[in-house]
Image (tube, rainbow, N blue to C red):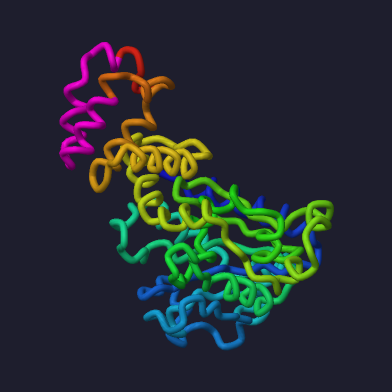
């Protein structure tokens, strides 16, 4: 479960104020993916026409059309409710409060099954940048269609999804981050574990090492083979993070997404698939170091690889000494 709404809200507002102070001329934006349900009523022609909005047509021609595209919407109460202006046009915009409340509700709901449409997490985060909405949207759009040379297949990548970024961000180079975010942008969002994550443009020193095309966002965002592996695991990783949170009933560590991904790769290396992958991952995440080499555990995993769907039963048959030695963690 995420923080209570008041704490959740204050954490985000403080982070937004800090992000804006990095570039004082920054505007604040909502990164919103309405999907097919549009919970905030900002698609289907419902948004106030006076709002500054830029579309991210990331999957044009793949079953999505304009009402369902992600969009970048500027917060500015002077355009929609000038009477609310008290201290700051962006922070006084009622849409900011609506987006925070919706994000909090969505994080209290489970993820859909792998492959299902994520209708509940349309609020993809909040941006602080002096760049225009159109400029930011252009970078996300250019990054979205990539060719996986190993599979000789083109994919539409959800760079606008904070759950995708939580997995990809640690692997991204300075040039890749510049290509996606430009030189002056902070993106704040809640990841699948419910933690506030920050994805920011590299510092001036870091950016100096990248070429000018990457800084402007004009360079293509090339993806390495290990990164493609992460892309192809994104759905199952997000599902397992949510399953882990439900199983634990307590906050997950900040590296939850990376930890789940590592165990998922380990499960596949053992030849597991389907339900057995979930059983392996959710068991492994709660065990102490060293269980991986235990002969009884390895026999259980090997047996499940030869007889799919049996790992849960085989783990239940492990002797009490295994559990005394390896876990679960207190």
Q: In the picture provided, is 322 more to the left or to the right than 103?
A: left
The one of 205 and 31 positioned closer to us in this rendering: 205
Q: Give the quarter of the figure containing the N terminus.
A: top left
| Quadrant in the picture for the C terminus | top left
Residue 65 to residue 26: above or below: below
Residue nearer the viewer, 105 or 22: 22
Depicted 326 relative to depicted 175: above or below? above
In the image, 62: left or right of 136?
left
Name the residue located 55 percent from the left edge and 61 percent from the top edge. 125
Residue 328 location, quadrant: top left
Q: In the figure, is residue 286 to the left or right of 303?
A: right
Q: Does residue 318 belong to the magenta stretch?
A: yes
The answer, for residue 91, to whether it is visible in the render is: no
**Measuring 34% from the left and 43% from the top, which residue is drawn there?**
268
Q: Is residue 203 visible?
A: yes
Relative to 246, say whether 192 is above or below: below
| Residue 196 rendering spot, x and y as whole percentages | 56, 48
Residue 272 place in picture, x, y as percent: 27, 41
Majority secondary structure of magenta residues: helix
| Bounds of the magenta segment | 298-323
Q: Which quadrant of the figure has residue 193?
A: top left
Q: Nearer the viewer, residue 43 or 243?
A: 243
Q: Is residue 137 above or below residue 261?
A: below
Count of numbered badges drawn on the protein: 0
Does residue 302 show up magenta in the picture? yes
Residue 129 placement, left or right of 119: right
Task: Give the residue displayed 76% in from the left and 70% down from the top.
Answer: 213
Which residue is located at x 46 percent, y 53 percent?
Answer: 229
Residue 183 spot, x, y in % from top left: 76, 64
């Amino acid at each position: 479960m995420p923080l209570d709404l008041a704490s959740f809200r204050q954490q985000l507002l403080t982070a937004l104020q800090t992000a804006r102070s990095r570039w004082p001329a920054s505007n604040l934006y909502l990164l919103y993916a309405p999907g097919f349900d549009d919970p905030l009523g900002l698609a289907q022609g419902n948004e106030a026409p006076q709002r500054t909005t830029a579309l991210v047509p990331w999957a044009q021609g793949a079953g999505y059309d304009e009402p369902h595209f992600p969009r970048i919407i500027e917060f500015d109460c002077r355009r929609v409710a000038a009477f609310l202006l008290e201290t700051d046009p962006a922070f006084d915009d009622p849409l900011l409060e609506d987006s925070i409340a919706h994000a909090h509700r969505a994080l209290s709901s489970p993820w859909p099954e792998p492959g299902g449409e994520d209708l509940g997490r349309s609020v993809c985060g909040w941006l602080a940048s002096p760049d225009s909405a159109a400029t930011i949207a252009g970078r996300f759009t250019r990054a979205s269609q990539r060719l996986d040379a190993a599979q000789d297949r083109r994919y539409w990548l959800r760079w606008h999804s904070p759950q995708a970024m939580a997995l990809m961000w640690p692997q991204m180079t300075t040039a890749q981050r510049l290509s996606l975010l430009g030189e002056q942008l902070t993106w704040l969002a809640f990841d699948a574990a419910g933690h506030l994550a920050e994805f920011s443009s590299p510092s001036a020193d870091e950016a100096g090492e990248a070429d000018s095309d990457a800084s402007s966002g004009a360079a293509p965002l090339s993806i390495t083979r290990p990164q493609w592996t992460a892309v192809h695991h994104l759905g199952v990783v997000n599902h397992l993070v949510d399953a882990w949170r439900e199983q634990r009933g307590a906050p997950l560590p900040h590296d939850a997404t990376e930890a789940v991904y590592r165990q998922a790769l380990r499960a596949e290396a053992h030849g597991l698939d389907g339900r057995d992958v979930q059983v392996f991952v959710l068991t492994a995440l709660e065990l102490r170091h060293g269980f991986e080499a235990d002969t009884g555990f390895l026999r259980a995993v090997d047996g499940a690889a030869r007889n799919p769907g049996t790992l849960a039963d085989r783990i239940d048959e492990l002797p009490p000494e295994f559990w005394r030695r390896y876990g679960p963690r207190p």
